[in-house]
Image (cartoon, rainbow, N blue to C red):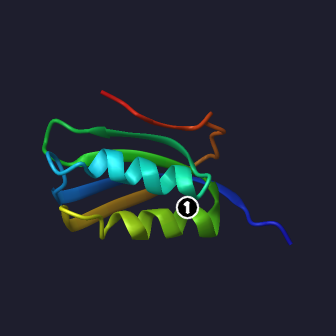
């Protein structure tokens, strides 16, 4: 049975800017074959969209809460209609 494809929009809060969070999250997403994007937000948080099989997307999101150098103190997530992104990119 195939996993459902999902797209999750996530906002990570805490010490997530200036600590290579976006680069490290991109490495995790790419290593697991999850597509999407990640960018810094003006309020000091980091916004991301992760797209792929549900268990893999959830694993990437969970791994992102424990990236080296970062301290994630909060996470907001909402599911969107599936988007088939090409690769995973860091947006500026």
Q: Residue at x 75, y 66 (%)?
A: 3
Q: Residue at x 44, y 51 (%)?
A: 27
Q: Nearer the viewer, residue 31 or 37?
A: 31
- Residue furthest to the top in view is 92
Q: Secondary structure at mark 1?
A: helix
Q: Is residue 78 left or right of residue 24?
A: right
Q: Is residue 6 left or right of residue 42?
A: right
Q: Nearer the viewer, residue 79 or 32?
A: 32
Give coordinates of residue 89: x percent, y percent: 46, 35
Instruction: Name the residue beneath numbered marker 1.
Output: 57
Q: Is residue 72 left or right of residue 47?
A: left
Residue 79 shows up from this direction: no
Give coordinates of residue 13: x percent, y percent: 20, 58
Residue 62 shows up from this direction: yes
Give coordinates of residue 23: x percent, y percent: 34, 45
Up/down of 49 relative to 56, above or below: above
Q: Residue at x 17, y 51 (%)?
A: 19
Which quadrant, please, contains the N terminus? bottom right
- Residue furthest to the right in view is 1
Q: Nearer the viewer, residue 38 or 5?
A: 38
Give coordinates of residue 38: x percent, y percent: 38, 41
Up/down of 1 relative to 46, above or below: below
**Dividing the picture into quarters, in which one does residue 4 lie?**
bottom right
Which quadrant, please, contains the C terminus? top left
Mark 1 is surrounded, within 10 Å at the Cα level, by few (under 14), some (14 to 19) or many (20 or more) other residues, namely many
């Amino acid at each position: 049975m195939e996993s459902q494809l999902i797209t999750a929009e996530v906002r990570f809060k805490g010490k997530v800017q200036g600590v290579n969070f976006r680069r490290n999250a991109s490495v995790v997403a790419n290593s697991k074959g999850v597509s999407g994007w990640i960018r810094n937000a003006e309020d000091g948080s980091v916004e991301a969209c992760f797209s792929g099989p549900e268990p893999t997307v959830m694993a990437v999101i969970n791994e992102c809460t424990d990236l080296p150098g970062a301290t994630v103190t909060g996470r907001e997530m909402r599911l969107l209609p599936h988007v088939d992104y090409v690769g995973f990119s860091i947006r500026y």
